[in-house]
Amino acid sequence: MSAPTMCPTSMSAFSGSFQRFSVLNCRLSSMVGDWGCYVKEGHDLVAGHLQEKKGYFYIVLNYKDECGKRKNKWISTGLSVKGNKKKAEALLIEARKNFEVPQQVDQENPLFSDFMLQWLEMMKHRIEITTYASYSNAIKGRIAPYFKEKGIRLKELQPKPIQDYYQYELEVRGVTANTVIHYHANIRKALQYAFKTDMIPSNPADKVERPKKINLSAVFNKEEMNRLFDAVKGDPIELTVLLAAFYGLRRSEVVGLKWDAIDFKNKTITIQHTVIETSVEGKLIIVEKDRTKNKSSHRSLPLVAAFEELLLRIKKQQEQDRYLYKDSYCTDYLDYIYLDKLGHRIKPGYIMQLFPIVLSRHNLRPIRYHDLRHSCGSLLLANGVSMKEIQA
């Protein structure tokens, strides 16, 4: 049977339709090509959306981890819902662009930087918060970032990279030898834990030469001490200077001194309470505790006449301030001695800020506030306190 034939009119119509189809196909191909480029450029963009919670926008990113498990990551925008939708959407886009899937940590042989962070987290509830703050600042701020860049794993860590790190801190960052010694203490303690738990066969930090401790202490002579006492007379810092110079008190002990620690009848002063200012993960906190740095710090000392006179003057001034400022006077710290005119407790950081200014203003050579403690024994002796009382 012969194939059916088309009339010229049908052929012309078919030809025209085919050409239009071809043009449409080319356009579709072009569009698909463009869409393919779009998909290619955006295929790594993590899924995400905005979520309202307690009046604030949160970014919620949805991703698959390395094991294929779907997970959500919540990120606070800090933006209230009202009037901030466009800003929140911009943050969402930025978060989706910059998001990287968290890498799975090799528990058997993690990066040394990750191990230090894990150890820090483990220690968080085993040590004082002030000690944790010190560890955290060293590890999160210095140690972990340096070793993360090096990519060294725990089991491969040798003494040489640790030694190189100490040299880097000393020569490039310009920190003191005493600071590096603190870093070494953190590293060695963490690695000792790894050694005891059989994560590593030995502690590489034991083979590292730590820098020699530098004695930064400086002591004022008798003439300089008298000039200092004259300079601070009547100044808000007078109390703290005398407490450090006569009794060797630390700034946390000065700020923590309460009226019930003063026994005017038996002429004694008891050091038993501290107030410490510290930074934990970027947040400044005040820590109060009814114990001092160590057992020897909990002590009773004789109340010398010059200091007793100052305390009585301060007590009278606080009573006058409370009467003068009435409702504006803070009553939260009535049991504390070191207050400002409105009854607020002086912060430990204030002492460290003001002391060098006072020295500079009166042309006294610069020393640390802590160095005043070295003169306490001789000053007590000069004020009629026996060596036996001082050593008690």
Image (spheres, rainbow, N blue to C red):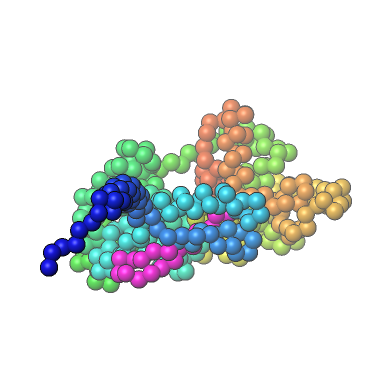
Q: How many marks?
A: 0
Front in this rendered view, residue 161 or 273: 161
Residue lying at the far top of the rendered structure: 363
Q: How far from the left and from the top, in percent, is residue 25? A: 30, 51
Asked if the magenta segment contains residue 123, the reply would be no
Q: How far from the left and from the top, in percent, is residue 321? A: 82, 48
Residue 345 seen: yes
Residue lying at the far left of the rendered structure: 1
State the residue at coordinates (33%, 37%): 172
Residue 206 seen: no
Q: Is residue 50 above or below residue 305?
A: below
Question: Image check: 281 left or right of 29?
Answer: right
Front in this rendered view, residue 53 or 243: 53
Report the magenta residues as a range: 62-78
State the residue at coordinates (28%, 54%): 10
Q: Is residue 368 above or below residue 207?
A: above
Magenta stretch prevailing secondary structure: strand
State the residue at coordinates (32%, 61%): 103
State the residue at coordinates (40%, 58%): 46
Asked if the magenta segment contains residue 69, the reply would be yes
